[in-house]
Image (tube, grey):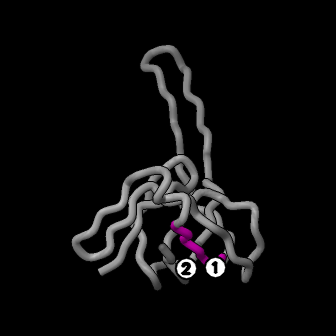
Amino acid sequence: MVYAIVRAGGRQEKVSVGDLVTLDRVDAEAGSTIALPAVMLVDGDKVTTGADELDKVTVTAEVQENLRGKKIVIHKYKNKTGYHKRQGHRSELTRVKVTDIAA
């Protein structure tokens, strides 16, 4: 089983070939390919974590779609003062499919 830990959008994700992963918005259109920087590579019993070895590792993914996440409702309320404030937020997301992990 080959998998890699990649850095994507301020977080780290565990990916293997064929996985669909939802990331923070990537500046790419649907159908294009992107390269994700690897933090760690596991190939069977061999674990690669050295920076010089990880420079040779390429994780490529194909952008499936750009989408927006579920709406989060923020409601602030203070008792007995009449203060309440409502705010909403939807994250900009990108769904990618990992196509290749090459060492």
Task: In the rendered view, tell whether residue 54 sits above or below residue 88.
Answer: below
Name the residue beneath numbered marker 1. Answer: 62
3, 10: nearer the viewer: 3
Residue 32 within the magenta-colored segment of the rendering:
no
**Secondary structure found at label 1:** strand
In the rendered view, does 69 fall on the left or right side of 33? Answer: left
Q: Residue furthest left?
A: 45
Amino acid type at circle 1 is: Glu
Q: Residue furthest top?
A: 81
Predominant secondary structure, magenta span? strand
In the rendered view, does 84 fall on the left or right side of 17? Answer: right
Residue extent of the magenta highlight:
57-63
Q: Tell me where residue 40 sits by quadrant.
A: bottom left
Q: Residue at x 67, y 70 (%)?
A: 34
Q: Position of residue 7 (x, y in %)?
A: 51, 55
Q: Position of residue 51 (x, y in %)?
A: 47, 50
71, 54: nearer the viewer: 54
Q: Residue at x 59, y 57 (%)?
A: 24
Q: Are marks 2 and 1 in contact (CB under 8 Å)?
A: yes
Quadrant assignment for the N terminus:
bottom left
